[in-house]
Every structure is written in C-alpha cells, then in structure tokens.
Image (cartoon, rainbow, N blue to C red):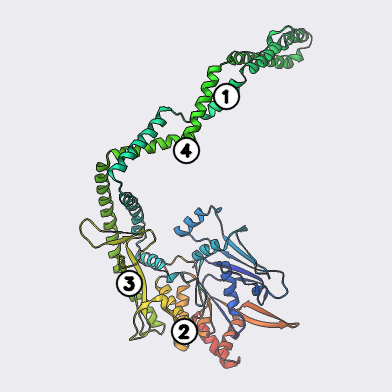
C-alpha cells in the first residue's frame, strides 16, 4: 500500500464540540466509532469544509473567537489534476495544505498552501481528493460525465477517448464555418468593394512594424533642431574648439605628467588614466559635432514626420490600436476578399474538408462506442456480483451506453448534430465521442430500472457505491473515499462482508468510514473512538486513535452495552479473524 495517496492528517480547533485536536490517518481503512450522539459526523463536517462546504456560524465553539480546520493531503498524480493545477498557475507543490477559518458572524476564509483561495477553487480541488458517500453531497460518481470517464478507465480506453478530442475540435471548427450565414450575391459584391477599398488604404500606406516608435523618437529633434544645434555647438566649442577648451587644457596637463613621470615613475598609472580620459572626451566631442551637423532645421522633414504620424493615427482608429494590428487587419481583409472572390470554390473545398473531418471523427467514435458497449456489460456484471455479496442479491445493476441522437440531450454544451454523408443516423458529437453513459439499477424484483442517482436510501446508496468502488478500485483516480451510513440496515454476516470489502478497497484507496458495527470496525487498520466528556459544565468531543488494548474494549462495547469477559473474548476473536 506504499503508493496510496491519502489525507495524512487533519487539525480541528474550536469546531463545534472539539476544542483542539490533531488526527493522523492511516493509508488503509480508517474507522470511526462511538456512542450515539458522540459527534462522529463532526470529523466529516470538518473534512467537508476542506472540500469547499460553506461554513456555518454555529460551527464555532461557544466562546471562541474563531474555529479552524486544516488538512494535509498527498498530491494527486493523474493528468486531470496536473492540468487543473497548471491552469491555476499554482507553484509546484510537495503536498497540499488546505486550511479553513470560520468566525461567529458567519465569515470564513480559505487557504491552499497558505495562499488565499475561493470556495469554488476548493470545491474543484476537492473533487480530485476525496469522494464522500452518504449524507454529504460530494458524490461525483452520480454525474454522467464521471460515469463515462470511469467506464473508459475500467476498459482502458483513455487514449482512444483523448484521440477523439482533436478530431472533434477540427470538425467543429469546419462545421461552424460551413454553417455561417450565407450572404446574397448583392451583399457579397458590396463586401468585396468595401474590403478592396480598406485593403488598398492599408497597403498604400506601406506600413513598417515599429516605425511609429521611430517617428515619435525623431519628432522632438525635428521640432527643436535650431536649439539643439546651438547647444551642441556650444558644448563642442567648450570641449574641443574654443581657446582654453577642456581638451586644450588637458593637453597641458599631459605635458605636466610627462615631466612628473621622469621624476616619479610611480605616477605612470595616473598618466595612463588621464590619457584614456582625454581619448574618451575627444570621442564625445566628435560625436557631438556630428550630431550638431545633423540637427539642421528641416521644415520639410518635420512636416513629413507629422503627416506620417497623422496617417498612422487615422489608420489605427479605423483598423487597430497599433501599427502591427493594422497590418494584421490587412492580412485578414486579404483573406476575406480572396474567399469572397472565390466563394464557390471555397464552399466546395469546405464541404470536402467537413466530409473528411466528419468521416474521421465518426470512425473514431464508432470504434470507441463499440468498445464501451462491450466493457459496459462486463462492468455491470461485476458490480451486480459485488452487490450480491452485500445483501442485495435481487438487485439488478447495469451500465447503459446510449448513442446521443436528436432525441436525447446533447452529451456536452458544445455538441452538434450531424448526418453522415453515407446516410447513417444523426449523431451528437462531443469531445468524448457521441456516447452517454448511465449507471442504472433496480433494487428489488418487479421494480423498474432507474438511474443510480434516483436512489433514496443512504444505506442503499453507500452499498452500491461500495460495490462500484470495489470493481473500479484500480480505475478511480480519487485518493480518499469516505463512507457514512455504510452500515445502515445491515448486521451479522452482511456486516462482516461489508467490512471485508472495505478492507479490500483500502488496498487501492485510503478509506474513512463512520460505523457503529463491530464487524466493520474490526477490519480497520486504524480505529478511532469518538466520545463526549463534560468538564466544569463544558462538553467536549474527544477523538482517540486506539491502541490494541483499547481497541478490544471498544469492540466489546460495540458488541454489547456492557464490557464483559464474554464480549471481550468475542472482540478478540473478531479482531483476529479480520486482521
């Protein structure tokens, strides 16, 4: 089990009846037991906050300023999570630390690795971490899209499914072009005239990327040419040309250094620096002289510069916010004009492209659908067998694969209806094919089969989910599974069967289970006891991970209201059988 991802630990502070507590969970099957009303579901409520549930003001322990819950999770390794994480631009994590804070006025805060996040983000993240079955609403497996994904994982069809997506997108783009509104001949000619005029206006300007910046840089020089030339000449004279200029006086200093060098050779480094400084000043003087000559008054150049900037401004107002955008618009106009001028050829070519794209997409979808239908029978039979072991021997379970057609809802909002050129029935394509998967069941003989989501009983739902999870253990990407009310309405040998299935399931996933049955608790790799204590008129919920001796006592209590030598012996036997 070393590779199982999990919820490692959870801290709970000033939350309902819990004052301050930290729980470390096991990789395998974690069971929480306790007396009725002890507060076993408090742990699940706290976990729900980490998965994006809304905080309630009454969850703050009376008298506390705030409550807090934190949980440390391993990082999921599946591609869906990696894509989600990358899309949110989070830093690469070594672990996931989720923290919630709640206040008496109903406010709450959420953090992921110490960064503030929204509840929506937590809810999205939670869907990759934990699946809660029972009283809560984190039942991802009831969604048709999730059922489809589970079937594909069960059948090993992920690569074939992923290969459909680019084929669908290519076909969708082409059909959108084909279905675009057809214009009249008169409107086509009018558009061609407009496009030709606009394209000619852009091309006549002979635009060059980056020229506007060059013109803006040159403009102040053209406007202030005389002043710039006067200042440059004055600086040039002071540096080089005038009597007593800086360079003339530096020449005198050089002569003095020559005399000094003869008497004190140690001055040589300073003499070298002086020579280099003089050379740099000469370069500055020559460059300044060249610029002064360039800064001649040029009224014609100034007018041309202003006219060009004005032209660019007018083109940008009409065709784009930058010169580059105007050039791009020119390319678009050229393409549209070519399409309008060759409308019939374009239409015929597009028809061929659509037909080819549709043929490739249909072939891939038919192949995928056939494999799904074959796998659906195997999945349905396997789950039904698991249900028989769980006391639902008369139940019927099946995985129904329906080809989406005009009589059914679209498999996705972007799905489109099509009719193959070969005359096949119409399909509603999506990026996952044209199939809709529905898990259906009938709990008792004579009852009509119905979608799984129509199940009303929490205990029934938990057992169906347990059966599904047992079959799909290797396919389900969720690291942690939580079962609440798993033992509703069962006992004896059936409870033993449920416990063993949970333990086997814990070989693939971390499992957390709230139970009151000793048969299930005895299968746990980590057993937690929830109890209530009253100290100085204050009630506290206490959760302890039991050691072997404590575990025997708790199992004995679950077997009967009193702990007796007989119940203790029975507890030892039960534990021995299930460990």
Q: Alpha carbon of mark 3 to alpha carbon of mark 2: how far?
A: 31 Å
Q: Alpha carbon of mark 3 to alpha carbon of mark 1: how far?
A: 73 Å
Give the mark toward the camera: 3 or 1: 1
Q: Identify the residue at horizontal 49%, vertical 32% (top origin).
A: 314
Disc on the earlier residue, 1 or 4: 1
Q: Measured from the top left, where is residue 288 in percent x and y?
A: 63, 15
Residue count near mark 4 (Cα–Cα under 10 Å), binned few <14, some 14–19, many ≥20: some
Q: Residue furthest left?
A: 422
User: Which of the two residues, 133 or 347, is positioned nearer the viewer here?
Assistant: 347
Give the mark toward the camera: 4 or 3: 4
Q: In this figure, which residue is indicated by the disc labeled 3?
A: 400
User: Which of the two residues, 388 or 302, is positioned nearer the viewer here?
Assistant: 302
Q: Measured from the top left, where is residue 535 in percent x and y?
A: 73, 82
Disc on the earlier residue, 2 or 1: 1
Q: Alpha carbon of mark 4 to alpha carbon of mark 3: how far?
A: 53 Å
Element marked by disc 2: helix
Disc on the earlier residue, 4 or 3: 4
Across the whole image, how many numbered discs are drawn on residues? 4
Disc on the earlier residue, 3 or 1: 1
Q: In this figure, which residue is indicated by the disc labeled 4?
A: 320
Q: In this figure, which residue is indicated by the disc labeled 2?
A: 496
Q: Above or below — where is 524 with respect to 128?
A: below
- Residue 219 circle label: 1
Element marked by disc 4: loop
Give the mark toward the camera: 2 or 1: 1
Image-quadrant location for residue 422 = bottom left
Give the mark toward the camera: 3 or 2: 3
Is residue 467 at least partly visible in the picture? no
Q: Is residue 197 left or right of residue 106?
A: left
């Amino acid at each position: 089990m070393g590779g199982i991802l999990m919820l490692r630990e959870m801290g709970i502070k000033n939350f309902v009846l819990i004052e301050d507590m930290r729980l470390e969970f096991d990789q395998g099957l974690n069971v929480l037991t306790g007396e009725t009303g002890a507060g076993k579901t408090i742990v699940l409520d706290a976990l729900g906050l980490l998965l994006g549930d809304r905080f309630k003001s009454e969850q703050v322990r009376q008298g506390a300023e705030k409550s807090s819950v934190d949980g440390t999770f391993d990082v999921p390794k599946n591609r869906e999570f990696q894509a989600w994480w990358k899309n949110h631009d989070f830093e690469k994590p070594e672990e996931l630390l989720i923290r919630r804070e709640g206040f008496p006025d109903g406010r709450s805060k959420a953090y992921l690795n110490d960064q503030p996040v929204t509840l929506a983000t937590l809810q999205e993240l939670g869907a990759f971490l934990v699946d809660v079955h029972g009283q809560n609403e984190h039942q991802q497996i009831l969604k048709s899209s999730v059922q489809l994904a589970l079937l594909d994982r069960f059948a090993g069809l992920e690569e074939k499914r992923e290969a459909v997506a680019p084929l669908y997108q290519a076909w969708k783009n082409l059909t959108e072009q084909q279905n675009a509104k057809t214009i009249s001949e008169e409107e086509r000619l009018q558009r061609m005239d407009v496009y030709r005029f606009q394209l000619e206006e852009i091309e006549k300007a002979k635009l060059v990327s980056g020229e506007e910046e060059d013109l803006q840089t040159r403009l102040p020089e053209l406007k202030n040419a005389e002043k710039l030339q006067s200042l440059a000449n004055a600086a040039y004279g002071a540096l080089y040309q005038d009597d007593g200029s800086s360079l003339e006086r530096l020449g005198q200093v050089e002569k003095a250094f020559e005399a000094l060098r003869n008497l004190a050779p140690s001055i040589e480094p300073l003499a070298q620096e002086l020579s280099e400084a003089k050379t740099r000043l000469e370069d500055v003087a020559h460059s300044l002289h060249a610029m002064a000559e360039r800064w001649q008054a040029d009224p014609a150049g100034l007018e041309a510069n202003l006219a060009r900037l004005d032209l660019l401004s007018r083109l940008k107002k009409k065709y784009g916010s930058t010169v580059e955008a105007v050039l791009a618009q020119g390319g678009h106009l050229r393409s549209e004009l070519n399409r309008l001028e060759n409308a019939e050829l374009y239409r015929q070519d597009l028809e061929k492209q659509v037909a080819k794209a549709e043929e490739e997409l249909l072939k891939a979808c038919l192949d995928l659908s056939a494999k799904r239908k074959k796998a659906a029978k195997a999945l349905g039979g396997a789950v039904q067998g698991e249900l028989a072991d769980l006391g639902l021997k008369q139940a019927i379970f099946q995985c129904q694969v329906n080809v989406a057609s005009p009589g059914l809802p679209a498999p996705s909002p972007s799905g489109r209806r099509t009719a193959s050129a070969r005359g096949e029935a119409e399909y509603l394509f999506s990026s996952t094919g044209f199939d809709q998967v529905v898990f259906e069941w009938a709990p008792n003989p004579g009852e009509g089969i119905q979608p799984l989501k129509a199940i009303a009983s929490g205990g029934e739902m938990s057992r169906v989910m347990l059966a599904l999870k047992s079959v799909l253990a290797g396919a389900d990407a969720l690291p942690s599974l939580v079962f609440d009310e798993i033992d509703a309405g069962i006992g004896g040998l059936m409870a033993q069967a449920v416990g063993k299935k949970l333990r086997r399931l814990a070989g693939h996933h971390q499992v957390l289970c709230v139970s009151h049955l000793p048969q299930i608790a005895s299968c746990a790799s980590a057993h937690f006891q929830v109890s209530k204590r009253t100290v100085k008129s204050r009630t506290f919920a206490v959760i302890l991970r039991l050691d072997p001796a404590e575990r025997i006592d708790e199992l004995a209590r679950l077997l009967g209201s009193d702990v007796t030598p007989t119940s203790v012996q029975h507890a030892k036997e039960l534990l021995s059988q299930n460990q």
